[in-house]
């Protein structure tokens, strides 16, 4: 919106990513110079062109971001918003309430006696853990594939997304980021482009990728090459803030992010994405040449080897407990 600072969007006609800037006379859209022109690389006879031709119908089939995700982001920034209001929101959704109760009584958070009411569960977990659990359970419903051949890949994507969200939140704590709950949600949706492409495969009304789903190597190439653009497009459709869109688009190449204000979130998500892949929560095995200490986002965020080690020491245990509580 005008006055909210620079923006990032995808042109719905040429599908090029655009940087938006506003002034009194309106807004100006400039194509990102580091990104190839989609009009030259996605002709009608190419797979990319076929996917882009069906992008509009496919987006209409994509589930909307749960309203509670947006509400939590807004309300947590309100200094008068407290745990009673958050508990009231949770009571509206039995699945979320059950996950909160389960997590509060898990080995990771369990006290001397079991918790039997939602207020007590929220008090035991704390505002941040409750908010993150709400985001996980609410957004889990997006990661559903009707096509059984895509189901396993979708489950891997879900585990990777949750792991990246949790790790991004931990990085935010180490770097004293001002809005860790927003960082968590950004990590959760950073691969929204892969979600879009996997759902397109499983949708019989679209079927853009049916010709390549029998070719795993080609399908992986499509996911890897096209998911940043579609991640930006999905975040745009969900009307998420510009820095969320930037994290979805630049998390594999944060050094190309054009706006300084977006860099902290982009680098946080980029590093979290890499760390959880190294820890075994990627969609594919991590490469042996992944050196976290020399990662550009490690350098940007100023994380020492000691802080990296602190970040990773209990990561797997924490994630498995989180998966168990929200399953």
Image: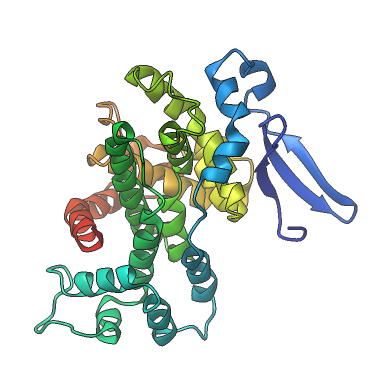
- Between 293 and 243, the one lying in front of the other is 243
Q: Nearer the viewer, residue 90 or 129?
A: 90
Res 117 visible: yes
Against 210, residue 192 (above or below) is below
Instruction: Decide if residue 148 is on the left or right side of residue 36.
Output: left
* Residue appearing at x 37%, y 23% in the figure: 213
Could you say which quadrant of the image residue 85 lies in?
bottom left
Q: Is residue 203 above or below residue 75?
A: above
Residue at the top extreme of this rendering: 45
Which scheme is used to colour this image of the protein?
Answer: rainbow
Residue sitting at 42 percent across and 22 percent down? 221
Q: How many marks?
A: 0
The quadrant of the picture occupied by the N terminus is bottom right
Question: Is residue 304 visible in this depiction of the protein?
Answer: no
Residue 206 x %, y %: 51, 32
> With respect to residue 247, does 31 lie above or below?
above
**Residue at the front extreme of this rendering:** 205
- Residue 256 screen position, x and y as percent: 57, 35
Quarter of the image for residue 127 reads bottom left
Quadrant occupied by the C terminus: bottom left
Residue at 30%, 31% in the rendered image: 149
């Amino acid at each position: 919106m005008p006055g909210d600072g620079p923006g990032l969007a995808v042109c719905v006609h040429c599908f090029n990513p655009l940087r938006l800037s506003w002034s009194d006379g309106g807004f100006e859209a400039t194509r990102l110079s580091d990104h190839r022109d989609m009009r030259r690389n996605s002709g009608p006879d190419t797979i990319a062109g076929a996917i882009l031709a069906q992008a509009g119908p496919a987006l209409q089939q994509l589930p909307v971001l749960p309203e509670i995700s947006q509400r939590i982001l807004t309300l947590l920034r309100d200094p008068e918003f407290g745990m009673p209001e958050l508990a009231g929101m949770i009571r509206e959704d039995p699945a979320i309430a059950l996950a909160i109760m389960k997590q509060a009584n898990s080995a990771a958070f369990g006290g001397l006696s079991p918790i039997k009411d939602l207020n007590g569960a929220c008090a035991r977990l704390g505002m941040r853990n409750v908010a993150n659990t709400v985001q996980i359970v609410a957004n889990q419903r997006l990661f559903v594939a009707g096509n059984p051949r895509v189901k396993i890949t979708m489950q891997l994507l879900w585990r990777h997304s949750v792991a990246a969200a949790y790790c991004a939140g931990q990085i935010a704590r180490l770097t004293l980021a001002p809005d860790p709950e927003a960082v968590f949600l950004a990590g959760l949706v950073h691969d929204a482009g892969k979600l879009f492409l996997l759902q397109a495969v499983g949708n019989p009304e679209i079927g853009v990728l049916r010709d390549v789903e029998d070719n795993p190597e080609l399908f992986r190439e499509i996911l890897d090459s096209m998911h940043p653009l579609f991640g930006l497009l999905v975040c745009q459709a969900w009307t998420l803030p510009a820095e969320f869109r930037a994290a979805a688009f630049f998390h594999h190449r944060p050094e190309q992010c054009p706006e300084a204000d977006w860099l902290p979130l982009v680098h946080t998500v980029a590093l979290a994405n890499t760390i959880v892949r190294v820890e075994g929560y990627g969609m594919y095995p991590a490469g042996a040449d992944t050196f976290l200490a020399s990662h550009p986002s490690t350098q940007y965020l100023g994380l020492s080897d000691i802080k990296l080690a602190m970040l990773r020491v209990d990561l797997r245990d924490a994630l498995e407990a989180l998966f168990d509580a929200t399953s």
